[in-house]
Image: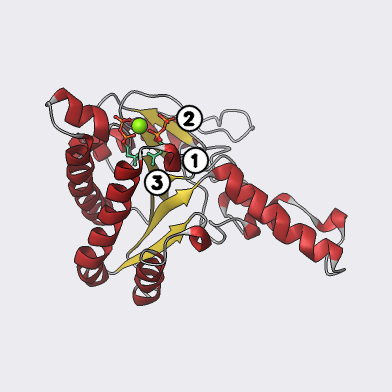
Amino acid sequence: MSDPSARTLPLHIAIIMDGNGRWAARRGLPRTMGHRKGVEAVRETVRAAGELGIRYLTLYAFSSENWSRPEPEVNDLMGLLKVFIRRDLAELHRQNVRVRIIGDRWNLRSDVLPLLLEAEETTRNNTAITVCIAFNYGSRDEIARAMQSLAVDVAEGRLSPEQITPPLIASRLDTAGMPDPDLVIRTSGEERLSNFLLWQSAYSEFVFMPEYWPDFDRAMLMRAIDIYRQRDRRFGNVAPASAAASSATPPPASLAVGS
Ligand code: IPE
Ligand code: IPE
Ligand code: MG
């Protein structure tokens, strides 16, 4: 890895954890085994990101479109989230991890929602790293919910249409108050966003990796960060005179923080 002091670390890394099913199929195993191994990769990634000094890590765990999968698989994924929170919450708390959930939580099953709320509440004052789990998350759904809340304010006279600006919209998204992701990683070789952080990734750097999610580990995270550090982020501006400083160029304030 290049000299860690030379270029800034991404403040926020977001990961599309893809390829659990193919990882299992390649081994002649049921898809569910891929999801189980994927949870182990989540544990390692959270630990590694914290140790590397990453402040925000967003993990795409279940999309609003994943409901279209066969019911046994959906149930399996719900069960895994429950087991993960029950088993790992104490350890995450010990690691000073703040857990945050994005996605439409109010349509979740009554056995899942209390666990998500408990994870957020237990860890709300933790400061080492924010681990944001995107669950029942879809960017278009998130944006539609934000628009509905703005429309209610306009209809009830608390807001005028010209007050609707990009920072105000960002403050109504599930990610309100979080910086936009600097780096978006997708595993499994697919090169698409699949309805993930469409608004927030306007100026993100993308790293697509061929490995399946269950094989993701600390070394792969460091590899992705290393690729990110070679990138020249310009945010619409011209390249700075010193290429070495480019990756450290701060984004305009309106792009940097989601509120
Ligand atoms: C990612 O792996 C996990 C979820 C989407 C929940 P997949 O289940 O999408 O695995 P592939 O893409 O079919 O291999
Ligand atoms: C994206 O993966 C969602 C998650 C990783 C949770 P999918 O496997 O659902 O995406 P598509 O269907 O290949 O676009
Ligand atoms: Mg997939």
Numbered label attached to residue 213:
none
Q: Are marks 3 and 1 in contact (CB under 8 Å)?
A: no
Check disc 3 and give the amino acid type: Phe
Q: Residue at x 52, y 41 (%)?
A: 249
Indicate yes or no: mark 1 CB to ligand 2 under 8 Å.
yes
| Residue designated by label 1 | 196
User: Residue 125, how many percent across, how many down?
Assistant: 39, 76
Instruction: Name the kind of residue labelled 2 in the image.
Output: Asp
- State yes or no: Cβ of the residue under disc 2 lies below 8 Å from any atom of ligand 2: no
Distance from the alpha carbon under mark 3 to that under mark 2: 31 Å
Residue behind mark 2: 232
**Lower sequence index among marks 2 and 1:** 1
> Do the numbered discs 2 and 1 sit on residues whose CB atoms are within 8 Å?
no
Q: Earlier in the sequence, mark 3 or mark 2?
A: 3
Q: Residue at x 48, y 39 (%)?
A: 65
Secondary element at image label 2: loop
Q: Evaluate whether residue 20 shows in this view.
A: yes
Q: Nearer the viewer, mark 3 or mark 2?
A: 3
Which residue has dot 3 on it?
62
Q: Is mark 3 within 8 Å of ligand 2?
A: yes
Which quarter of the rendered picture does the C terminus lie within? Answer: bottom right
